[in-house]
Structure formats: structure tokens, C-alpha cells
């Protein structure tokens, strides 16, 4: 892998710290210092205005705009939707003696910024050296409330070092933000004004008519003069703040943001809802400090539930905590209408869209840490089932076809890589349902919503599949599997195998529900018009599913004809040609035995229990040398399998990119936003890789190992309602229940009943 | 084939006649009544203004606009170019007693229009019944000069049937035309005014800065009052013409159009060039009648050279003459910078772009009828070689990659059907060079320009191809062959075979030129840096080219894996689902053994001499039942092969769509423009199909047959400078030289020396 670290941040177990300001790295840092609370996200941009390279990004989960697609043919989507850049609620301008602060223009020193995982706050400080010789120390702090998702808080502290005087602060709410990817602002202002002490503004997107209320109040003890200001898509206040040499003056701003996607809500109702929320959450008894304490409380709960500790490796300790922190910031399941964009709420790349990453990479983290959030993610798919049903119709199929890229449940991927050919979302949703239910035991979700999705997904796969003329087997023609370097193939092994498992699981659940829930099952059968005939068809498809494999070598063929694809020694590609998408004509990627990311190995991970270690080794040895890892999702899966087949050095080599993918900017595109969904792979890498956990079978399995460089590590797991902690040191593993009932676990092939007193076991060599 | 004729035009051997006006069919007729002279084309729209459904289309060969493509990846083109709708030089408005003529609003009767193949003129007449009871008979006539490509002429004759009075005519040049496909006007006016009696206007396209001068003069004997008029992108005259009951008053307009694509030409020069052309061609000694006579002269020459006569089948007689007429209108080789758009100059569909149709379908017509025009078409490819070299670089290949769709030599096809995967243009150009040189004997073109193209094309195919890992053979991965229902396959048999032939021919020509033209050959070798090593490589690639074939059945496999593609009985598709592109999700087309158009059969036609009749029969019997013929290029190739393998009924069945494809609107999209390039397939269908001509070998071959319904037919052929005529009646064929030296021909496997006294042979049964 041609990936090189760019290390410029301080290593700290609980913080990200940057000292000194490098304009070249500002966008990277803006991504890393992003804040979010699932409802809204804001990049770490300088809120005081910055003339240099910046992406002033403020995003709201599920708030979208769209651009029309000139679609001439049936089955091509008609509009591309994207998470739209929204109100700059941190808008600030600072002027002293006629000089306005702008780090691109002004002199400053002692620059430092921090992101604190324990408080969830982002702070920044530096000393501004004015042209007239005055020195003003500035500290900025901001957070988005985890308890009150509509609330954002900003603090600015002014400390004049060598003068007394006045600072002029313009603060406000700015809807004139440019959505950079499209080069335009999508907002019109419907209403603005001051009411009940709240300065509010209501914006509406041009095409989709999504609306956003934003209102603020300030808390500045010594503010003497304030003037209301209204501008183009802007409302705010000018404040003159007297400063005294050596004394810190504090300026706090509280903002309520409220997004409304329902076009039926009338404007007055919406405006008043915004004001109500402001009255409810911004009142005299709250202060920046009191709200900041609540943040600390919230995060201490998160760390108690989900912290992974690594001893002897401060860089990865910081890295994995950053990952967990970002996972919670992006999503914690408060709202079943939200999903997880590939870049979370941290940038415009991938247009804020959610992919199969959600179920394949993110869901396990939530299943084992925050089952409520896991359920919420699945609820998103249930909520958007009508869109998936409609999309299947557009593709001349039955049942539900889930979109490969979506913000609201509709498909937002067009001819580039042909969304119509990408069948790996439906089976990922089905896998997610199975995984969630198996680990949590939540049968009521399965029977109330899960099975309906399974049936509709199965219907799609039954009608999209076809029978080969020569092989007489069932399979999928004209598809792209997870490996995006094979644009259009027949019988992709991953897709075929996942479809086979889908049919089998759906049929199992039907049988189980039939037995367990006779009445509601009958209702479901009737409502969905589920017939014996179609079940028989699914069984037949599953039984005759084509799984291309060379029996002599035990190597599964990624798709029909893959073994004849021209060979390329990927190590012969000059490092300057990476990333290949930027340096190679895109079609050239499609005609080698080179793969972008795990495809055969992916199903070997997902259905780990179905394959022997020998099979995994044979397939790893064949596919890994052909894998370019140009997906951020790739290294962790390879690391997990390498650990299992007894290649600990390779396992560690691939792990190196996992926790610090963004902190060390390995893919050179962190500036566009964080690799949020890949971040979850870091968690899997530790728990499934070194912890050796397998959760695809009936029982939960652990085969712990430890990287040579580490002294020890530990991680918590919630399994069937019991909270477990797994601790591993150089020689032994210790697993115990922190709360809940005893559970049965398999450790190195032996079954144990684990309760609060725990089980201690000597480490064994894995995969040898 | 689910194609149904819509017959509403009168059958006439030398004309297209429509009686009565059907607004529903107006656009279809506008296409059919199109005029063109290679330089410019104008649809048969009502020039007096029409409030109903019309496509006011006026096009100039090679004059283009472009729209940007949001291309994120290397190898995707950055702009789509298209032939832009240009000046309405026929602009007319006619008012009597305050009522303005508009067929969508006014009462009229006795409507009739004609397109005359002998004069190349389009005329239209009807009686306008005014609201006040007056009746005015109107006759419109127009033509575009074949001798002076810049000149267009319009005549309007007014005959008041029951009154005397005045008609007000507004005539002018209108640049405010809407390019319908993009819904906007692309023209800005740079200059306009009256100079030397010419009323001129100079327009410029928005993005590409193509410029077009248009200037006119009128000739109206009794015009009393004229007033100059200037409007938005418009200049013209208001003319008041006195009318006398029962007397015809004539109003003529002469227009000079001059297109300039060179942005370096300064505006004054361009303006003056327009005025000069006007002075040169519109002067007192020319009249509408004198120019019309020149037209008749021109067309009589065309018919003397190229007429195909069919006895006993008036519909196809009319049809084939319409085809030949449209071929000459669209292209006759005056300008090597022009090519043939898929719809000629008759509409906006296919964006005025030229495809491989030019070399594969149109070129034979010109080779055998108008070798100068054939050479001009090949010159287009030579002229655009620099673009093809550049495009190959963009695709990470060497040599020349010719565009699948182009107006100026650059690629104008993007992700829809991936231009990067379509490799059938380069080999078509090479085939065209070989075909042209073999039939005309023009070695100087071959050595001066042809070989350079062949070498650069071979370089592309050598670097684009790859070696199969299992087969050890050379071939092409990630391609789309002629059959567009297989979007992306490996080792398309057509592409592989054509590439093999390309390499072999290039090597042959190199050897021949080396021998024949030592000095200029050395110069070429040096200039192109042609090495022995690369020639050896081409030889090796050709020798080891993969040609997928089932030896038992003699059936060539369209591509690797085609025989396993799920089977679909195409006759089971309801007729209401055609055309499939409109009714099926586009991706569904890609996953059957259903094909859109000949692919294996196409190379069996092109290299006919390489395959036995038995092989052709086996492949026809396999592929024809799988072919949906959704390309207008498909039926004729099937007809030609059916004739050869002894299936005369099928040959005639497929022929039925050839000559009258547009006249009977078989594909239901003639409204968008004529299927200009398919029109040429009609010519091939008669000459190669019934005439049994084969021109792919060293000698010219004929195996004549005659459809049962016909009494006789004849066609002329120019071969190695000798003009031959082939006449066939129910029992015999007669071939003789009209001019030129005696030539050797093969007729039913016997070799004859044919001179002006001719050879007469009894018809034999073909293919039995």
C-alpha cells in the first residue's frame, strides 16, 4: 500500500492537539477538529472569517438539496441529492482599532488548538499582534450539545496583554454560505427578526424546500452597546466590548438550530417552534459553563461504555479514541430518520450520502456498544422501504432494491459506477438485521419490521437473478460487487453468496415466526401476499446458487472469468501513480486481476464460521497480493483475516492505517472530510482482529492475540444485554461481565459461562 | 422485429408527395422534407411561422456548441459537443388585412407538399381562407444550391383567388432560434446592417465562438414599399406587395450563409467575406429560375452516376431513390473537414455526431459511386488524427484512439455506454482505408496518409490489448462491441477479429510501401519512429489473438461467457415493450443472450471471404433469433447474409425496412431526423444483398439474385475507375462497363473480363 503518514498533531491519550498554524494543513485540521452531535455537524473552520483556504462547512443530518440529472433512459435516476452546506451559526467578526482579525492577513503567535474527547469541545487560542503594536490574546471554544441536539455554544475570551480598549464583535447567523461542491448558495431567507430576545432567521433551500430555523442569544457580561444588523441572508448584532489590560472578558453565544423537512408545516408554526426551543434551552439559569459540564457528563458515559484502552502504544490509543469519539459525534441513534454519510457531517465529499458502509462497517460498533443506535440505523431502512420498493419497480424487479448511495432513502448514484449494477446494499441490510437480532436477541424488531424487509429484499434478489444457460445455476448477471475495480461482471461470488445466505435466513425467520407468532405472522403473510410458491422459489435459487470456485486450490473466483483477467504485478505500479483514480484512465482499472478492496475476503469475514482457516489462508494468499487497498474500508478486513490465519505482522501492518487514517492523513484527502464510515473499521480491527471476536454464528467467539508492540489492551462488549469487558495482556486474556447475566462464550474453541467473576485464559497462538 | 409501417405519403418514382396536412405527423414530414447540400441543412418546417408542433431546424456541417461534463475521473471527456441549431434564414411572416398566416390558427385547404429528387427542391402549396372570406393561394419553394454551397433560395408565390389587395411580408434572418435539445438559444449577434444591397447579420455561438454570417437580398418585381427591421438577434425587411385577383405574384429571397470556425479570423474580414460571396452569387443576372435549372443539372448528373432502378416495386423504387438523394444531400465530399452525422443535417438527435457508421455503412456507397467523396471522408480521419493521438494518451494508451461520437474529431460520448470501452471505430477506419484503396487503387492516398493512420491505430490496439492469464491469448478486456446490449465484456469476438485483421493489414502495407516507395517509406519510418520491435509485437498479437468459438458448432462466441448468458425468447417480449430502451430499465438489457444488432454477423459480412457459407449459416441461425434489431443498422446486414445463405424470403423480409425506414417511420422516431447513416445500408442491401457483391477480397465478386416480387433491377458501380452497370431480371444478370477499361470480376465463382460489351449470365440459386 502506497500510503505515507503526515504526522503533525501532538500525541495525547484524550485530545487532539495542534500547535502552530500551517495554512497548507488548515483544511485537514478543519476536518479533524469537526464537531457533531448526530443532528448537526460543523467543521473546525475559523469562525472569525478567514481569507485563506478553508471549507466553511455546517451540515444538518438529512438536510439536502438536489441537482437534476439529464437522464434519457429508464432506470437512471432523475436527480442527485446531497447534504447541503447550511447556516454559519458561528459567524463572528472581530475588530480592534479598525483592524479586523483574519489569520490570513494578521500577525499572530502562540497558536494552539485542541479537540477534547472528554468534553467534546473544540478550543483554539492565539495572540493577535495588531499593526498598532497592541497584543490581544484570543481563546475560542465551541461545542454542540449532545443532550440538546438543537443547541450549539460558542465562547470567545479576550485578554488584552498590553492595552485597555474596546473590541468590536459582529456576531450572527449567516445563510449566504456557498456549497463548495456546486459553487453556489442554496438558501433563501423566508423570515428574520428579533423576538423574545432571540435573534432568528429562517432559511429555505432552493429546490427541495428544506427549511432551517436558526436563532441566537448572547451572554456577554460587560457588553455595553449592541446594534442589530441585517444583511444579505444574514442577521446579527454588533457588540462593543470594553477590555481591560490583563483581564479576561468573555463573550458567549447560544444558538438553536431547528431543521424542518416537512413542506406541509406552515411557516408560523416553524418559526414559533424555533422560538420555543430557544426559550426552553437558552434561559437565565443556563450558562456556557453549566452546559459544558453536561457535555463532560455525557462523554464520561460514552467512555465508560465504549472506551478501548491500549497500553504501550500512545499513538493508536489516541487514534482509537478519536475514532470512537467521531462515531458517537456522527451517530448515536437519537433519530431513526438519520443515517451515517461516508464523511459523516464533516464535509461535502461523497455528498453526505450513506452507502453499504452503514450496515457492513458501522453497524457492528453500535450493535456491541449502543444497541439502541444499531436499531435506529435499521429503522432508517424500514422507514425508507417504500423508496426501495419503488426503485425496484424502476429496475423492472419486484420487492425492495435499497440504494447504493442515499441521504433520504432515494437513490443518488447515477451512471458513474452504475447504481443499478450494485447489489450489495440489500444483502448488507439483511445481514445487519440478522447480526443485530442475534447479538441483542431483539426478536420483536425482527418480527415487527425485520422480516418485512427480508421478504421484500428476497423478492428483489429472486427477480433480479437469472439462470445461466450453460451452468444451469442461479446467479446475478451484469453486476458490480464490493470490488469497484470490476465494473460489470457476471456471478460475482460475493453477491451470489450473500444472496444465497439472504434467502436461507429469510426462510428460517419465516419458519421461526410462523412457530412463535402465529397470529401476527398470518397478518404479515396476508399483508405482503407471501406465497408458498415464492418461498419454494427462494429455496431453489439458494440451492442452485452459483458460487464460482476452483476446488483444487480452494480459491473462490471473484466472478466468472476473473482467473483469466490479465495479471498485473501491483507492486510494479510507481508510487507516483496513486491514487489510481487520479492517474489512470478510469476504464483501465477495470481490466486486470487487480482489486480495489476485499470482495471474496469480505464474505469470508462476514460469514467467517462457514470457512476453514485453510480456505481463508488460500484466498488471502491469492487476493491480498492483487489488492490495491484504494478503499479506506480495505486494510482492516485484511488485518482481521491476517490475524486469524496466523500472520500477526501483516495484521499489524494493515492495522496501522486503521485508527489514524485521518489523523495522519494516509489517503491525502482528509481535507475533504473524515472517513467516518472507515473509522468504524478501526474498532472492528481491534475487536475482531486482535480480540479474535466472531459474531456471525450462533455463539460469540473470541480468539485473542496481542500485537508485539502492545503491552495490553481492553475493550467492552454488550452481548444479549450483558456488558462484558475483554482485557488482554502479553500472556493472558481476561473476560468478565461488568453487569447483566452470565453469558456463554467460545474462547479458543472452548465454551465458557462468563459472569462477573470472569474467565482468565492463557493466550494461544492463532491460526498456526 | 416489432416494426410497423406508417404509410401516408404518395408513392412516386421521383418524388415524395404529401397531400393534406396532419399536425400529428408534421415533425415526421419536416424530417423527410429536409434539404441539404453537405454545407448546410434545413428541415422542412413552415417558414412562415407555425404555432403547432415543429422543430425549426437549420444546421451547418461541423458548426457546434458544447456543454460541460462534470467529470471527476481521468479519461472521462470534459465537454459534450453538438451540432447547434443556427440561423433561420427562411424566416417569413405573411399578413393580409391584419390576419397573419399560421397553419396552427388559420383555415386552409388543398394542402400539398413535394420533395423532388430531380430538382432537389421542396415545394408546398395551399389555399389560405382568411377570416374575412378572402382566399389566397400560396406556393412555397426552396432549395439549397448544390453548386454554391453557401447559397439558399426561397420563392413564395401569391395568387389571390377572390380579391385584389396587399400582402405584407416580413422576411429576414433570425438568430434567436432555440436549440431544442438544450432548451436555449446559443447565438449572440456581433454585427448587423445593410451594405451594398445585402442585409447581413453575423452571429456567434456562446461557448465555442463559432461564427456564422448570413446575408440576403430579395427579388420581388412589384414590391413597392420596403422597410428595414431590426429586432432581437434579427434583421429583415417589411415588404408590402400589391396583389391582383387571379394573378400570381412572386417573391424570391436569396441567402448567403458563411460559417467560420477559426477564432483567429477577425470580424471585418469575416463580414467582408460574407458580402463578397453575396456579390459573387447574388447579382442581377441570376434568378430563382436560373439557379433552379442549375440544380436540375446537378441532380441529373447524380442520377446518371448513381441511380438504382427497381422494376415492379414502386414503393422500394421511391425508397431507394430517397436514400440516394439523402446521401448526396448530406455528403458528397466537397469538404474534407466534414463528416456524416447519424441524422445528417436533419435534426438534433445524436447531436449531429458521426459514429463508426461513417466507415462501416456510408463509405461503401461513396467508394462505389463517388470515390472522391469516399476519400474526403477518410481525410476527415487524417485531419483529426492529432485529436485521436491525444485521446489515446488520455486513456493511457499509445497511438490513435478514434472517437466513437464526434463532430470535430474530439470525443463527445461520456459515461452513457462508456466511449472508452468502444473500440470499433479505429478498426472501422482501417477497414475503410483498405476498402477504399482496394476498390479505387489509390495507393498514393494509402502511402501519403493511410499508412500513417494504420500505424497509429495499430499502436493503440497493441497497447490497449492484454494477455489472458488462463488462455495465454491476446485480446481486449473491458470493451463494448457493436452489440450495445453487452455493455462491458472481455474478448468481444468482433473487436478481437477486427484488431487481428488491422495488424495484418498494417504489416502488409508496411511491406508493400517499403518495396514500392523506399525513400518516402524511410521518411515515414523515421517521422513515426516505427521500429522492427513493434512490428514483431503486432505480428505476435495477431497470431495469438483470441477468437472465441465453439469448434463443434462453428459458432463464434460473441464474447467470453456469452454462451452462459441467461436465455430470453425475444419473441415472448410483448410488442408494447418496444423500443426496449424506453420500456426496460437500461441495465436489464445487458444480461441476456439477446443482442441489439449484428456483432459476429457483422464481421462475417465485412470479411465475408474468410468464412464459408456453412459457417455463416450456423452463426446466422444462432444469432438472428437472438437479435432484437433495435439498431436501424441491423436489418440490412441480416438481409445480406440471409441472401447469401439461401434464405431469400428472410432476406426480403429484412430488406423491407431498409429503403423506407424513414418514409414509413418504422422506428417511430423519424420526427427527430432522418436515419441518415442507415439510409446507406439500403444501398448496401441491394448491391451486396441481392447483387451479391463482395468487395473484401482481392477481386470484386457478384452472385446476383432477385426478390420474387421484382421484375428487375439495376445499379451502377465504379471499380478501379471503370464504371459498371449491373442489370438483373427474373432469369439473367447482365454486367457491362459503361466507361473505362475492362475489369476482372468474379460472378458465381467464375472469373470474367468485363468490358463495354458486357457479360450475360443466367441467375443461379445462391447459398443452397
Image (tube, coloured by chain):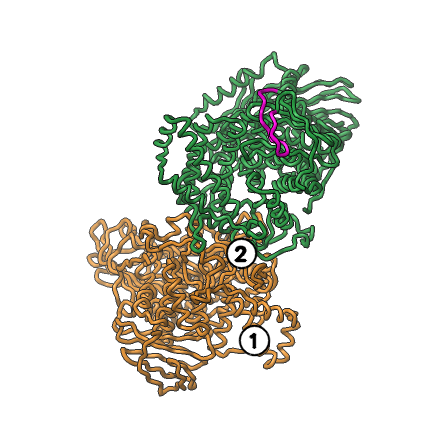
Chain colours: A orange, B green
Q: Main secondary structure of the magenta part?
A: strand
Q: Residue furthest top?
A: B285
- Start and end of the magenta stretch? B739-753
* A215 vs A499, nearest the viewer: A499
Q: List the residue tagged with mark 1.
A: A509
* Chain letter behind tag 2: A
The quarter of the displayed image where residue A750 is located: bottom left
Q: Position of residue A703 (x, y in %)?
A: 36, 77
Q: Nearer the viewer, mark 1 or mark 2?
A: 2
Q: Position of residue A170 (x, y in %)?
A: 35, 55
Q: Residue furthest front?
A: B750
Q: Is residue A194 visible?
A: no
Q: Is residue A339 visible?
A: yes
Residue A393 lies, with reference to residue B75, above or below; the image says: below
Q: Residues within 10 Å of mark 2 (few under 14, many from 20)?
A: many
Q: Is residue B447 left or right of residue B559?
A: left
Q: Is residue B741 magenta?
A: yes
The quarter of the displayed image where residue B171 is located: top right
Q: Position of residue B509 (x, y in %)?
A: 44, 33
Q: Which mark is residue A174?
A: none
Q: Which residue sits at x=47%, y=36%? A: B505
Secondary element at image label 1: helix
Secondary element at image label 2: loop
Q: Residues within 10 Å of mark 1 (few under 14, many from 20)?
A: some
Q: List the residue tagged with mark 2.
A: A478
* B739 vs B60, nearest the viewer: B739
Amino acid at each position: 500500500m502506497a500510503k505515507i503518514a503526515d504526522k503533525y498533531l501532538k500525541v495525547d491519550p484524550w485530545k487532539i492537539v495542534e500547535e502552530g498554524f500551517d495554512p497548507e494543513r488548515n483544511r485537514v485540521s478543519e476536518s479533524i477538529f469537526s464537531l457533531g452531535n448526530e443532528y448537526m455537524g460543523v467543521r473546525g473552520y475559523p469562525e472569525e472569517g478567514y481569507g485563506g483556504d478553508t471549507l466553511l462547512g455546517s451540515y444538518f443530518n438529512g438536510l439536502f438539496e438536489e441537482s437534476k440529472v439529464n437522464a434519457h433512459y429508464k432506470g437512471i435516476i432523475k436527480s442527485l441529492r446531497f447534504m447541503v452546506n447550511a447556516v454559519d451559526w458561528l459567524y463572528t467578526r472581530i475588530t480592534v482599532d479598525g483592524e479586523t482579525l483574519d489569520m490570513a492577513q494578521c500577525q499572530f503567535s502562540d497558536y494552539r488548538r485542541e479537540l477534547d474527547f472528554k468534553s467534546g469541545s473544540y478550543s483554539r487560542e492565539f495572540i493577535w499582534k495588531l499593526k498598532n503594536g497592541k497584543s490581544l490574546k484570543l481563546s475560542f471554544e465551541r461545542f454542540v450539545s449532545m443532550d440538546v441536539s438543537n443547541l450549539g455554544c460558542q465562547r470567545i475570551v479576550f485578554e488584552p496583554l498590553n492595552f485597555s480598549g474596546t473590541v468590536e464583535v459582529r456576531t450572527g447567523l449567516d445563510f449566504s454560505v456557498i456549497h463548495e461542491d456546486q459553487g453556489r448558495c442554496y438558501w433563501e431567507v423566508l423570515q428574520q427578526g428579533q423576538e423574545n430576545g432571540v435573534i432568528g432567521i429562517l432559511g429555505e433551500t432552493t429546490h427541495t424546500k428544506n427549511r432551517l430555523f436558526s436563532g441566537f442569544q448572547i451572554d456577554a457580561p460587560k457588553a455595553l452597546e449592541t446594534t442589530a444588523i441585517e444583511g444579505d441572508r444574514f442577521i446579527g448584532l454588533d457588540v462593543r466590548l470594553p477590555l481591560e489590560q490583563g483581564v479576561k472578558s468573555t463573550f458567549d453565544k447560544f444558538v438553536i438550530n431547528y431543521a424542518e423537512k416537512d413542506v406541509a408545516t406552515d411557516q408560523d408554526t416553524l418559526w414559533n417552534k424555533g422560538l420555543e426551543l430557544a426559550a426552553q434551552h437558552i434561559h437565565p439559569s443556563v450558562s456556557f459553563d453549566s452546559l459544558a459540564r453536561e457535555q463532560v457528563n455525557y462523554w464520561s458515559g460514552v467512555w465508560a461504555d465504549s472506551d478501548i484502552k491500549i497500553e504501550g502504544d500512545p499513538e493508536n490509543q489516541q487514534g482509537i479514541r478519536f475514532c470512537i469519539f467521531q462515531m458517537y459525534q456522527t451517530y448515536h441513534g437519537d433519530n431513526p430518520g438519520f443515517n451515517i454519510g461516508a464523511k459523516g457531517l464533516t464535509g461535502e465529499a461523497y455528498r453526505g450520502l450513506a452507502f453499504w458502509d452503514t450496515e457492513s462497517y458501522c453497524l457492528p460498533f453500535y450493535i456491541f456498544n449502543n444497541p439502541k443506535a444499531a436499531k435506529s440505523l435499521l429503522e432508517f431502512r424500514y422507514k425508507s422501504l417504500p423508496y426501495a420498493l419503488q426503485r425496484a419497480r424502476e429496475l423492472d424487479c419486484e420487492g425492495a432494491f435499497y440504494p447504493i448511495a442515499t441521504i433520504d432513502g432515494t437513490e443518488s448514484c447515477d451512471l458513474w459506477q452504475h447504481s443499478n449494477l450494485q447489489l450489495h446494499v440489500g444483502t448488507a441490510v439483511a445481514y445487519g438485521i440478522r447480526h443485530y437480532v442475534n447479538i441483542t436477541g431483539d426478536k420483536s424488531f425482527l418480527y415487527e419490521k425485520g422480516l418485512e424487509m427480508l421478504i421484500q429484499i428476497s423478492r428483489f434478489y429472486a427477480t433480479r437473478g437469472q439462470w445461466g444457460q450453460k451452468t444451469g445455476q442461479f446467479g446475478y448477471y451484469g453486476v458490480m460487487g464490493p470490488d469497484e475495480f470490476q465494473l460489470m461482471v457476471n456471478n460475482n461470488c460475493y453477491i451470489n453468496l450473500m444472496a444465497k445466505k439472504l434467502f436461507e435466513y429469510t426462510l428460517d425467520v419465516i419458519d421461526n415466526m410462523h412457530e412463535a407468532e402465529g397470529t401476527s405472522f398470518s397478518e404479515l403473510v396476508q399483508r405482503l401476499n407471501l406465497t408458498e410458491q415464492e418461498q419454494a422459489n427462494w429455496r431453489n435459487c439458494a440451492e442452485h446458487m452459483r458460487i464460482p470456485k476452483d476446488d483444487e486450490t480452494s480459491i473462490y473466483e471473484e466472478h466468472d472469468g476473473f482467473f483469466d483477467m490479465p495479471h498485473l504485478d501491483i507492486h510494479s505500479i510507481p508510487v507516483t501513480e496513486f491514487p489510481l483514480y487520479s492517474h489512470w484512465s478510469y476504464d483501465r482499472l477495470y481490466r486486470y486481476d487487480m482489486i480495489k478492496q476485499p470482495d471474496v475476503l469480505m464474505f469470508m469475514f462476514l460469514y467467517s464460521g462457514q470457512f476453514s482457516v485453510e480456505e481463508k489462508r488460500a484466498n488471502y494468499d491469492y487476493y491480498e497480493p492483487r489488492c490495491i487497498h484504494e478503499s479506506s474500508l480495505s486494510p482492516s478486513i485484511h488485518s482481521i483475516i491476517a490475524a486469524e490465519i496466523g500472520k500477526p505482522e501483516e495484521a499489524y501492518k494493515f492495522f496501522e492505517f486503521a485508527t489514524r487514517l485521518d489523523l495522519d492523513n494516509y489517503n491525502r484527502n482528509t481535507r475533504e472530510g473524515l472517513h467516518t464510515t472507515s473509522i468504524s473499521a478501526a474498532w472492528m480491527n481491534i475487536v475482531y482482529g486482535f480480540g479474535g471476536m466472531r459474531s456471525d454464528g450462533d455463539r460469540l467467539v473470541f480468539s485473542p492475540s496481542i500485537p508485539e508492540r502492545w503491552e495490553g489492551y481492553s475493550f467492552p462488549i454488550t452481548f444479549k444485554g450483558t456488558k462484558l469487558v475483554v482485557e488482554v495482556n502479553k500472556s493472558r486474556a481476561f473476560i468478565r461481565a461488568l453487569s447483566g447475566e452470565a453469558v456463554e462464550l467460545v474462547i479458543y474453541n472452548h465454551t465458557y459461562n462468563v459472569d462477573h467473576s470472569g474467565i482468565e485464559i492463557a493466550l494461544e497462538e492463532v491460526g498456526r
